[in-house]
Image (tube, rainbow, N blue to C red):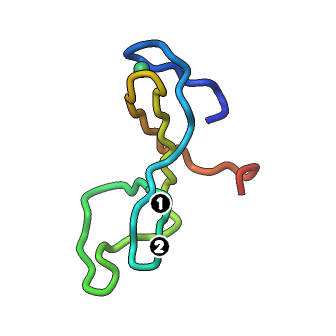
Amino acid sequence: MNEPVECIRCHTRMEVGYVPDGTHSGFQRQSWFPGEPKPSFWMGLKLKADQLVPVTTFRCPKCGYLESYGVPPTARDR
Ligand SMILES: [Zn+2]
């Protein structure tokens, strides 16, 4: 996600960012997970960490529109 993204509503260049998720241990980056949520008594939801995809969210500084992408990290990002 290194390409500039243009707002589909007002055609302004969007800012890259992310939506923080508040947890008991602080804030984490929002992630995407495939399928339906399955409750877990201990963890809240049953998840496999290797299937989590970090969510990148772009924000338009002019109109406030948000647009999110779930792009798996590449070897270069790690
Ligand atoms: Zn906009």
Residue 46 located left or right of residue 16: left
- Give the total number of marks visible in the rendering: 2
Q: Which amino acid type is marked by label 2? A: Gly
Query: Which numbered disc covers residue 26?
Result: 2
Q: Nearer the viewer, residue 59 or 37?
A: 59
**Which residue is pictured at 43% across the width and 38% down the height?**
68
* Residue closest to the eye, 52 or 11: 11
Residue 57 placed where, x, y %? 47, 40
The disc labelled 1 sits on which kind of residue?
Leu
Q: Is residue 44 above or below residue 27?
A: below
Q: Where residue 41 sits in the image (x, y, percent)? A: 25, 85
Instruction: Kindly identify the residue that appears in the image at 64 percent across and 27 percent down.
Output: 3
**The one of 13 and 46 positioned closer to us in this rendering:** 13
Residue pictured at 53% horizontal, 26% vertical: 14
The disc at residue 52 is 1
Does the numbered disc 2 mark a residue whose Cβ is under 8 Å from ligand 1? no
Hey, which quadrant is residue 30 in on the image? bottom left
Please say if the residues under marks 1 and 2 sit with CB atoms less than 8 Å apart: no
Instruction: Say left or right for 73 vs 50.
Output: right
Is label 1 or label 2 in front? 2
Q: CA distance from mark 1 to mark 2?
A: 18 Å
| Mark 2 element type | strand
Disc 1 crowd, CA 10 A, few/some/many (<14, 14-19, 20+):
some
Please state if 75 lies on the left or on the right of 22 as rendered: right
In front: 9, or 35? 9
Quarter of the image containing the C terminus? bottom right
- Residue at disc 1, secondary structure: loop
